[in-house]
Each structure stands twice: as structure tokens, then as C-alpha cells.
Amino acid sequence: MNEKTALIAGSSGLVGNELLHIILNSKEYEKVYSLVRRPLGVEHPKLVEVICDFDNLNAVEKFFSVDDVYCCLGTTIKKAKTKDAMYKIDVEYPIAIAKLAHSKGANHFLLISSMSANSNSRIWYSKMKGELEEKLQTTPYNSISILRPSLLLGNRKEFRLGEKFASNIFYGLSFLLKDSWKSKFGIEAKTVAEAMHKIAKVGIKGTTIYPSNKIAEIARNS
Ligand SMILES: NC(=O)c1ccc[n+]([C@@H]2O[C@H](COP(=O)([O-])OP(=O)(O)OC[C@H]3O[C@@H](n4cnc5c(N)ncnc54)[C@H](OP(=O)(O)O)[C@@H]3O)[C@@H](O)[C@H]2O)c1
């Protein structure tokens, strides 16, 4: 059972950090390589922190020979400052990771995209996420799993006004929604991470896209 290896990018983020702890404590991985810009301060016998410059992934290519690749990278326009800089983090880095890991024999690529992903959208963010999904699918993985969560809920260290406002509305009104509808508006980062790990265990061949309500259902059911 204890034979697989995983690579995770974005493990300092809201979903990625939940996921890192889940996969470190799961039985099926013997090693977890975490691509980070700076040390996270997490100690675990299975964890190898790969401190790297995401513009020069070839320098750390030896860590890319894994079974499963989890990508939870992303930023906001406020942090990135320009659309080009955001596109680089949200699209170019994930695609570079996908290509390098595939060239080293990786089998399954799991991506956090967004509920609104659509390459034909007139909304720049949605179009960007749609393009990310399309570019990813040109890399011939055995399995590609694309998770499209709605608003991510959880204890974010950084303050994001829009998301805070939206999550307050969600928590205030969620009692009005049926369980099956709640996740279409907001979903806990931990739920997304749990589902991502369960999806990796199954490893459906080809590309599978998981909308937010399906993500919640997978996390609920064992
Ligand atoms: N926020 C939402 O409600 C929402 C909804 C649906 C989908 N999504 C998408 O879901 C994904 C995960 O979201 P999240 O909120 O968990 O992300 P997050 O907390 O913002 O974390 C983002 C991760 O990306 C890394 N990153 C950012 N800039 C980087 C750079 N220049 N070089 C290397 N790594 C970099 C961060 O590392 P550092 O710690 O080093 O910065 C962090 O690990 C994102 O793609 C996001 O767009 C978000």
C-alpha cells in the first residue's frame, strides 16, 4: 500500500495546506514532495520540502518522478498586481509543472480550478481558468482531475475583503439552502482537499471535471 509518491504545489495556501496534511497522514504515499518558495515549518518523515524558484523548475526536476501531482497554486490580482503576473502563476506555472511531471512519468494530475472556468468567457478570471484547463488537457496524462470549487471557505491568514464579505453572506444565509445546494455557493477548503485526495485514490482514466456539489459529495462519502 505504502508505495506511491506525490508532488504538491501550493501547500502554503488555503486548500494546499489542508491537502498537505491529509496526504502526509495517508497510508498510500511513502513520500510527498512539496514545491514551495520558502520553508513551511512542517516536519514529517514522509515530507521532502523542495524550495525552488518556480521560474526555474528544471533545477529541481529530480523531484518530479512521482505518481500523483496535486496543484493548488493561484493568486489574486491584488497580490499579482498585473494580469500578466497573475496568468503566470495561475496558468503558466501549473502547466510547466504538469509537463515536467508527465515527462518524468507521473500518472495523475489533480488541479484546483474554479467554478466559473470557461475559456469563452468575457470575464478575464473565468477565461484564464478555462484556458488553464484546456492547456492542461493537452498533456497526455492517464488521469486528469479538475476540481471546480465555488467560494473557498476557511481560516485564511491573509485578509481578502471581497471573499470575507461573500463568506459572511454565505454563513448568514446558508441555513436557507438545502445541503445539496450549499456547496454551489461556498465550500470549505478542507472539504475540497479531502475530495481531492479521495479522487487521487480512485484515479479515473481520462479527464474528469468535478463541480462544487460533486466535490462536497465525494468528501462526504467514503
Ligand atoms: N478563493 C476562492 O474563493 C477560490 C474559489 C475557487 C477557486 N479558487 C482557486 O483555487 C486555487 C487554490 O486557492 P487557495 O485560496 O487555496 O490559494 P491560496 O491560499 O491563495 O494559495 C495559493 C498558493 O499559490 C502559491 N503561490 C502564489 N504565488 C506564487 C508564486 N509567484 N510562486 C510560487 N507559488 C506561488 C502560494 O505560495 P506562497 O505562500 O509562497 O505565496 C500558495 O501556496 C487557486 O487557483 C484559486 O484561484 C479560489
Image: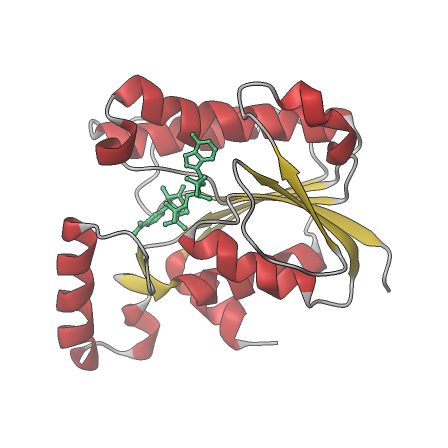
Which residue is more in the foreground, 73 or 139? 73
Instruction: Determine whether, in the image, residue 13 is placed left or right of residue 31.
Output: left
Instruction: Determine whether, in the image, residue 181 is placed left or right of residue 109.
Output: left
Which residue is more in the foreground, 92 or 43? 43
- The picture quadrant for ligand 1 comes to top left
Q: Residue 148, percent across and down? A: 41, 49
Viewport quadrant of the C terminus: bottom right
**Do we see residue 22 in this rendering?**
yes
Image quadrant in which you'd find residue 164: bottom left
Image quadrant in which you'd find residue 2: bottom right
Q: Residue 34, percent across and down? A: 63, 45
Above or below residue 102? Residue 30 is below
In this view, which residue lies farthest toward the bottom?
A: 175
Q: Residue 23, percent across and down? A: 65, 60
Instruction: Determine whether, in the image, residue 201 is placed left or right of residue 17.
Output: right
- Report the residue at 51% width, 61% height from top: 18
Above or below residue 104? Residue 10 is below
- Report the residue at 32% width, 78% height from top: 179
Q: Residue 86, percent across and down? A: 33, 27
- Report the residue at 61% width, 29% height from top: 97
Above or below residue 169? Residue 42 is above
**Do we see residue 196 in this rendering?**
no
Image quadrant in which you'd find residue 156: bottom left
Q: How is the image coloured?
A: secondary structure
